[in-house]
Amino acid sequence: MRPASLRVLAGWLIDGSGAPARTDVVLEIKAGRITAVRPSGRDPLPPDLDLSSATLLPTLVDAHVHLTMSGSADLARRQRQLRMEYPEAEAVIGRHLARHRRRGITVVRDGGDHYGHTLSYKHRAAPGAVHIAAAGRAWHAPGRYGRLIGRPPAARIELGAAIARCSVGMDHVKIVNSGLNSLRIFGKETAPQFAAAELRRAVAAADALGLPVMVHANGRHPVAEALAAGCTSIEHGFFMGRTNLEAMAAGSVVWVPTVVTMAAYGRHLAQGREIGGAAADADLDVVRRNRDHQLAQLRMARRLGVRLAVGTDAGSLGVDHGTAFVEEMRFLAQAGFTIEAIVAAATSSGARLAGFSDRGRLAAGQRADFIAVPGPPQTLLARLTAPPALYLAGRHHSSG
Ligand SMILES: [Zn+2]
């Protein structure tokens, strides 16, 4: 018989809010929700679940993925994944979700695919342990970058009108407002894809539907325009510069820096392999400088108090679903963020972006979804390279 309530003893707790880690804490859980978090003190009864040698934290949220694409470096396979029809996509997405779950990631925020298969999956496939927040098909300007993940508005239709018409079943709107980063010319910026006024009306149209807007933007102007339009988050944000970071801090706009994409390109090129497509002449030195510049922007963001969410862009070349997540967390550590701030970016920040108010923190009223990682918070990032123990509604979840 299932007991009515459950007491879990945690050696250490990082609650996802950014607050300092606590030691020897008891979580009280009833009907899958946390009812209290308190010091273990002189508890007369042994806990139902003793995790006194582990650090507990909320289950993780990858704030930027592309579920139809795998991180595979096999260019033929990548091409195939760009063209596949729904039944094949369903199998691919299912495999990627299993990888997220194995790494303790229970919410993913998808940045779009050309055919909208991920959105279809969300509404057609049986729900599993990993929740998908889906953009369906991203929006890009005609003739500009973005075909792999979306489509342009139809001829003579404004972006805002297209959003008002084509957002059924979506959790957020994804707009592409710049090109990709050059892997050949360091710091090369591209022009915004949409005019400032059109972008403003587009965000207003999404707002009217109650949908947050994630904007792919690199470079000063594309980011400044997205911020002026009132977007919810900036995705990538390479080379956006200090003024934009200050505006993000002031306006509580979330930054998803996806540093791991450059690290993955770097590994690929260092093995003497080609990236193909538009990046066929990529230069390893430029890729490394792109990464280092993003790390410098992260340090600036830390000093300015910009809110971050950990997102990997999983599906990008060399960025594998699930395993890339801890690598991105480690870049935040390199930029000087505390472990509590990193966990907040990896949990509550992304959960909010995905529309949840009852996930991403371990506090009274929240879902009792957590991972347990052996050892204290100081060793958390090293230990997270192995799959953590996953608990949903306070119960151990086996990935079987
Ligand atoms: Zn992306």
Image (cartoon, helix red, strand yellow):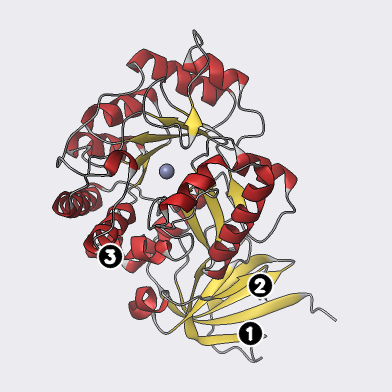
User: Residue 253's x, y, as percent?
Assistant: 37, 38
CB contact under 8 Å: marks 2 and 1 = yes
Q: Residues within 10 Å of mark 1 (few under 14, many from 20)?
A: some
Between 353 and 98, the one lying in front of the other is 98
The disc labelled 1 sits on which kind of residue?
A: Leu
Give me the C-alpha separation between circle 2 and circle 1.
Answer: 9 Å
**Residue 270, image x, y percentages:** 22, 62
Q: How many labels sit on residues?
A: 3
Measuring from the top left, give residue 181's x and y in whole percent.
26, 40
Q: Residues within 10 Å of mark 3 (few under 14, many from 20)?
A: some
- Give amino acid for label 2: Gly
Instruction: Quote the CA–CA distance across marks 2 and 3.
Output: 29 Å
In this figure, which residue is indicated by the disc labeled 2? 394
- Mark 1, residue position: 49
In contact (CB < 8 Å): disc 2 and disc 3: no
> Is tag 2's residue or tag 3's residue first in the polypeptide sequence?
3
Q: Quadrant of the C terminus?
A: bottom right
Report the side of 66 relative to 244 (left or right): right
Q: Disc 3 designates what residue?
A: 333
Element under label 2? loop
Q: Residue furthest top?
A: 156
Please give left or right for residue 3 compared with residue 49 in the image.
right
Query: Residue at point 48% right, 17% down?
Result: 159
**Numbered disc 1: secondary structure:** strand
- Along the viewing direction, whichever of 297 and 378 lies nearer the viewer: 297
Disc on the earlier residue, 1 or 3: 1
State left or right for residue 329 relative to residue 32. Answer: left
Note whether ligand 1 is within 8 Å of mark 3: no
